[in-house]
Amino acid sequence: MGKFQVKALNPEAAQLENIFAVMSDESFGKDLSAKIVGGVKKLEDLIAAGAIEAHKPNNVQNGKWFCNAAQVLRHCRNMRKRK
């Protein structure tokens, strides 16, 4: 008989992956994305590093940026209160 390891199912991780799967086709605007990740500079660094996909459908100066919602949520800042 072979050895089989049974991994315990982590329901929180499964739910989180489900949220990311649902949000993968959605987009957030640049302002909301910056608020979620912790600032415009951090968002721009994540976009430059390739961690967050961003696109600007209209090639005009004041066109709106759209960021992949699932990737933004993966890089959200810690919102918990400090004690």
Image: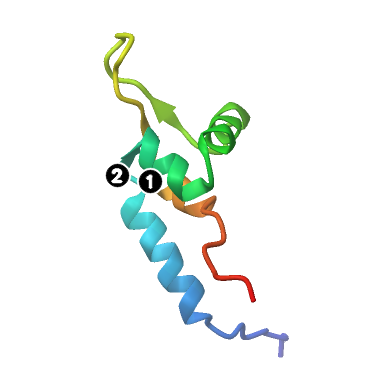
Query: Tag 2, which secondary structure?
Result: loop
Mark 1 sits on what residue?
69
Element class at badge 1: helix
Q: Amino acid at mark 1?
A: Ala
Q: Position of residue 54 (x, y in %)?
A: 43, 29
If the image is split into quadrants, where does the C terminus sit?
Answer: bottom right
Q: Residue furthest top?
A: 60
Give the vertical position of 47 relative to 8 (above or below): above
Tell me the tag on residue 26: 2
Q: Where is residue 75 drawn, in percent x and y?
A: 54, 50
* Residue located at (56% from left, 70% from top): 81
Identify which residue is drawn at 72% across, 85% down: 2
Count neighbours of disc 2 (C-alpha within 10 A) and say few if under 14, some if 14 to 19, many if 20 or more.
Answer: few
Q: Which mark is residue 43?
A: none
Q: Residue at x 53, y 36 (%)?
A: 43
In three-dimensional space, the C-alpha distance between marks 1 and 2, rounded to whole angstroms, equals 6 Å
As drawn, 2 above or below 38: below
Q: Earlier in the sequence, mark 1 or mark 2?
A: 2
Q: Are marks 1 and 2 in contact (CB under 8 Å)?
A: yes
Which residue is at the front of the view, 25 or 2? Answer: 25
Depicted 73 relative to depicted 34: above or below: below
Name the image quarter holding the N terminus: bottom right
- The colour scheme applied to this rendered structure is rainbow
Instruction: Give the residue displayed 33% in from the left and 52% down from the top.
Output: 23
